[in-house]
Amino acid sequence: MDENIGTLLAQVSRLLRRSFDERARGIGVTRPQWQVLSLLLIHAGSNQGALAEMLEVEPITLGRMIDRLQEAELVERRADPADRRAWRIFLTEKGEGLLDKLRPFGRDTLGTALEGVSEADRDQFMATLLRVRSNLSRKVQPDVVANG
């Protein structure tokens, strides 16, 4: 199979996830749990639907994950003052402490991945990935869809 950017990105992504998982397994955290906790650090008070969209999972799947995180006292649900049916999700102090333990695993994983890559190449790589993400994040214009 010929190497192409899409395949290579998928392989690197899988290897990064696997490497992080191996490091984090020792403290009993899964990558999906880490992703939820990390998002809540940035988007504290998000509702389940918004978090599910950011993680690209179904809300019911995320709901079960949040249930487990709440049982472990890593997150808490608070009533949404604007919507009686909704809950806002927040990290607890215990959840923030766990993220502090996980950060070195992320740094170690990236350090291993970028061994032998110069600072200039890292900067260029990051700029390229940001451009690719921006390109793919643009909304398709309606007349482009309509006219093919």
Image (cartoon, rainbow, N blue to C red):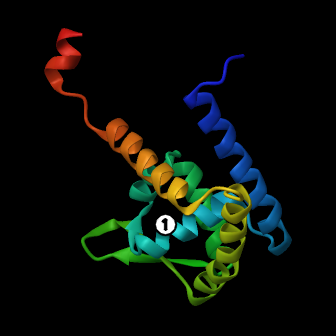
Residue closest to the far right:
26
| Residue in front for this viewpoint, 105 or 115 | 115
Say which residue appears at 70% left-offset and 52% top-offset.
17
Say which residue appears at 43% left-offset and 45% top-offset.
128
Residue 89 seen anywhere in this rendered image of the structure: no
Question: Where does residue 105 sit, x and y in percent of width and height?
Answer: 72, 71
Residue closest to the far top:
147
Say which residue appears at 16% left-offset and 24% top-offset.
142
Residue at the disc numbered 1: 39
| Residue in front for this viewpoint, 77 or 20 | 20
Say which residue appears at 73% left-offset and 47% top-offset.
15
- 33 relative position to 51: left or right: right
Question: Where does residue 5 sit, x and y in percent of width and height?
Answer: 56, 30
Q: Is residue 95 above or below residue 16?
A: below
Question: Where does residue 26 sit, x and y in percent of width and height?
Answer: 85, 71
Q: Amino acid at mark 1?
A: Leu
Question: Where does residue 85 sit, x and y in percent of width and height?
Answer: 35, 64
Total numbered labels: 1
| Residue in front for this viewpoint, 104 or 71 | 104
Within the image, what quadrant is residue 1 found in?
A: top right
| Residue in front for this viewpoint, 122 or 131 | 122
Within the image, what quadrant is residue 36 found in?
A: bottom right
